[in-house]
Image: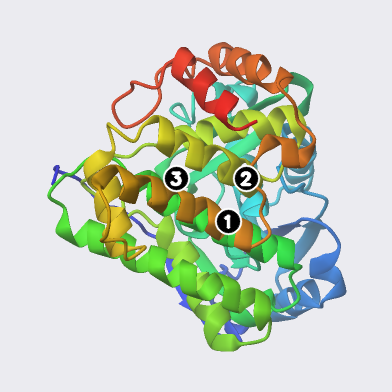
Amino acid sequence: MHDFELYNPTRIVFGQGSIARLADLVPAEARVLILYGGGSAERNGTLAEVEAALGRHHVQRFGGIEPNPTYETLMQAVELIRHEKLDFLLAVGGGSVIDGTKFVAAAVDYPGDPWHILETRGKEITRALPIGTVLTLPATGSEANCAAVVTRKSLQAKLGFGHPLLYPRFSLLDPVKTYTLPPRQIANGVVDAFVHVTEQYLTQPAQAAVQDRYAEALLLTLIETGPQALARPEDYDVRANLMWAATQALHGVVGAGVPQDWATHVIGHELTALYGLDHAQTLAIVHPNLLLERRDVKRAKLLQYAERVWGLRAGSDDERIELAIASTRAFFESLGVKTRLADYGIGAEAVERVVAQLEAHGMVRLGEDRAVDLAMSRRIVEACL
């Protein structure tokens, strides 16, 4: 296990009715901007509940943040904050809203072109407005970390960034708020959380027994609760366990002291930027094929995964590895998340487009060992067709 420093200041308030805590968590003098996505938060009463909980706080709204938050939309929020002199941001939604809010928080007082935040991956952030979140979609873990991803439509670029100043001050997690989510969003959330874990687990042995068992516990929980959440939308215990697993998947502990991959995410981001696919759809497409391409390098951890997560003990090592990867693909498919580019009407032209975007964005050495070069990325995308 490698040396590490773990830091996470986000206060988690978990459980039914947690929104009522807002008045105590947001400073009394704060001028609050509520950021949200589409109309569902308004239609299902969540926004009204949030505003009621804020009581006498000065509150304004900014809606319309997309499922893949765009720089263009977020800059409108930045201008609103500057004009109205708002000083506390409250994200109400899933990971996209929270990611977008993190960018807005960093961009308001950024001294140069805010796009530079993305180009430098957040390294030059020196100030950020405080953030709180009300999570309504378990998936990304953004409610408990300091990272985010933003798309710039005009450039067809989707880039990640992060900085410790972007940890939410608090996040409210009420499983009841997930009851009305469409099945597609629940399925996407399960896939997203699952791949978050495997990006930190299916790498190379690091003698990190706690991290390995922790990752395996989360994966087994997602395998169990994912189908249950689709079958029983208003089962509180199922939704609570799914919500907590998704938060833990990218909270920081799973990856502490171990190698991390993230090549699946980087390639997936380019597919989203080019074709508008859901983030989780791109992960379901890329991940099994990346594992097949990298099965020799990841051999020891894939065998561990096969045995501990999928219960595969019979057959040769190669057979168990291939079956474990096939089981991963089948799990995604069982949730209704398709795993081939052809399933989304995307053909062979995607290969060169994705590789060109990876090169343009400097993503030419990916993976836990930086060995996923453009030639290997091309092979992975070709296998996704």
The x, y position of residue 134, in whole percent, is 62, 68
Depth-wise, is mark 2 or mark 3 nearer the camera? 2
Identify the residue shown where x is 76% and y is 68%.
182
- Residue 11 x, y percent position in the rendering: 43, 68
Q: Residue placed at 31% from the left, 61% from the top?
A: 312
Where's residue 354, x and y in %? 63, 21
Q: Is residue 39 above or below residue 221?
A: above
Quadrant of residue 342 in the image? Answer: top right
Residue at 69% across / 22% down in the picture?
350
Q: Which residue is mark 2?
A: 339
Q: Which residue is label 1 attached to?
A: 332
C-alpha span from label 2 to label 3: 36 Å
Q: Nearer the viewer, residue 114 or 312?
A: 312
Does residue 107 appear left or right of residue 254 in this picture? right
In the image, residue 25 above or below residue 305: below
Under mark 2, the amino acid is Thr
User: Which residue does the image show at 34% across and 36% down from the upper left?
Assistant: 295
Question: Mark 1 belongs to which amino acid?
Answer: Phe
Q: Check disc 1: other Cα within 10 Å, few if <14, some if 14-19, many if 20+.
A: many
Q: Are marks 2 and 1 in contact (CB under 8 Å)?
A: yes
Secondary structure beneath dot 3 equals helix
Describe the element under mark 2 as helix, strand or loop.
loop
> In screen coordinates, is 330 left or right of 291?
right
Within 10 Å of disc 3 (Cα), the crowding (few <14, some 14-19, many 20+) is some
